[in-house]
Amino acid sequence: MDQQTFIHEYARERKNTNSLKWDALEERFGDADLLPLWVADMEFATPKAVTDALTKRIAHGIFGYSGVDKEYFNTYLGWQARHENTPFKEEWLQFSTGVVQAIYDLVDCFTEKGEAVMIQRPVYYPFSNAIKDKQRKLINSPLKNIDGHYEMDLADFESKVVAEKVKLFILCSPHNPVGRVWREEELAAVLTICQKHGVLVIADEIHSDFMMPGQTFTSAISVNEGAFLDHLIVLNAPSKTFNLASLLNSHIWIPNEALRKQYRAYAKVNRQTESSLIGQVAAQAAYANGDEWLAALIDVIYHNYQYIKTNLEAAVPSVKVGELQGTYLLWIDLSQALNGRTTKEVVQDQAKLAVDFGDWFAHDAKDFIRFNLATTPANIKQAVDQLIAALK
C-alpha cells in the first residue's frame, strides 16, 4: 500500500471525538486553538482487519467474564517471527491495562519505599512520575548528547548504581524522546552492569515496531542470546503500534520464574482486574493481519520526518532536528533559535502548536520539543510553516 492510498483510507478527523490529543487542549494547554502534535497516538484508524474483528465480536452482544483466546500467543509469536523475532515464551506473559500502569505496579512490587530507581533522562516522564508517586528515590544517569546523537554514559551509570545502591533500572528501548534504537552491544554493556550489581531491569519496548529504514530492533530478551533473562522484565503492547491505547491491553513478559511468582502474588492483592476482551480481540487481529498497514504507516512517518528535517533546518539553520532511528516521536533542539524567548512563547503562543515540551523529559531540556509524526503530511506541513514563522 502506498502512502497516498494509506492516507486516503485511514486518516481521520479527530476533533469532537473525546480525543485527549485534540479535545483537551484547553484543559491541558490553556488554549483550544492549537495544532496538536503532543500525546503519542495517531490520526490514523487501526487496520481494517481490526475493525472487522471488533464488529464481529460486538455483534455477538455478550461481554461477560472472558479468558484469553488460546491462539492469542501463537498469533503474537507469528508477528514476532515476521518482525523483530524475539523468542518470547507463553508462560512469561502477564497482562496489564497499559505499560504505564505496569511500570507503577512493577516499581511497587520489586522495590520498597526509599529505595533507588535509575532512569536515563531525557526520558518518557511517566518513569519519573512512577518513581516519585511510589515514594522511591529517583536516580538519573543522563544520556550524553553528542551533537544531537545520544549515547549512554556507562561510567556515570555504574558509579551511581554502586553509590546509590540502585535496585531497579527502567530502560527505554527504543528511546522516547530521543529516537535512538540501541545497538545490541550498547544493551549488553548496560545489562552487564545491572547483572553485576544485582539490579533488576524493566525494559519498556512499546515502540519496538517503529523501525526507520536501515534500523533493526534488538529486544533486551535477545541480547547475548538471552544472557540477562534472570534480571529482566520486558513491557510492550499493541496500543502504540496499532493506535489501540483506550482498549487497555498490554504485555508484561517475566522470564524468571521466581520473579513471575512474586509479581503474581503482588497482582493477586493489588490488581484485581479482568483482562480486556475487546483489547485482545483487536490485538490478535492486528498481529495476524497488520503487516501491510504498519509498513505504509512507517512510510508516512519517515516522510514526515524527512520533510521536517529538510524544511525546518533549511529555513532556520540554528534549529537541530534530531535523528530518528525508531519511534514516531521527533526530538528537536531550539536552543540556538529562540533569541531570548522561552520555548512556550515561540512554540505555543506564537506558532500555536501543542507539543510535549523538553522539560517534561529532563530539567535541562527546556529548549527542546517533541513532535508526534504519526499524523498526516498536511498537519506536519502546517506545523512546520507555523513554527518557521514564529522562529523568524
Image: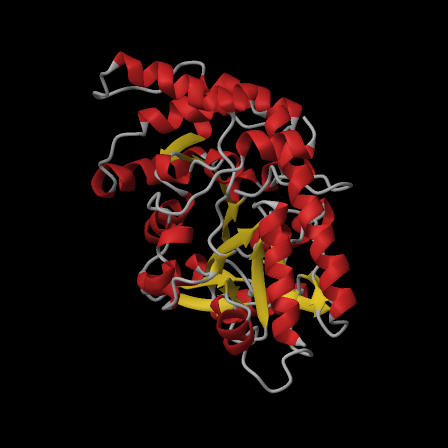
Q: Position of residue 298 (x, y in %)?
A: 65, 38
Q: Position of residue 222 (x, y in %)?
A: 64, 36
Quadrant in the picture for residue 291: top right
Quadrant of the snapshot with the C terminus = bottom right
Name the residue located 63 percent from the left edge and 69 percent from the top edge.
156
Question: Number of labelled discs?
Answer: 0
Q: Residue furthest bottom?
A: 340
Report the side of 254 relative to 370 (left or right). Answer: left
Nearer-the-camera pick, 304 or 135: 304
Name the residue located 56 percent from the left edge and 75 percent from the top edge.
346
Q: Position of residue 261 (x, y in %)?
A: 35, 35
Q: Position of residue 167 (x, y in %)?
A: 45, 58
Q: Is residue 313 above or below residue 58?
A: below
Name the residue located 27 percent from the left edge and 20 percent from the top edge.
66
> Is residue 217 something one can see in this rendering?
no
Name the residue located 69 percent from the left edge and 79 percent from the top edge.
336
Q: Is residue 52 above or below residue 301?
A: above
Report the side of 72 relative to 176 (left or right). Answer: left
Quadrant in the picture for residue 317: bottom right
Picture colour scheme: secondary structure
Nearer-the-camera pick, 4 or 157: 4
Quadrant of the snapshot with the N terminus = top right
Report the side of 198 relative to 100 (left or right). Answer: right
> Is residue 303 something one can see in this rendering?
yes
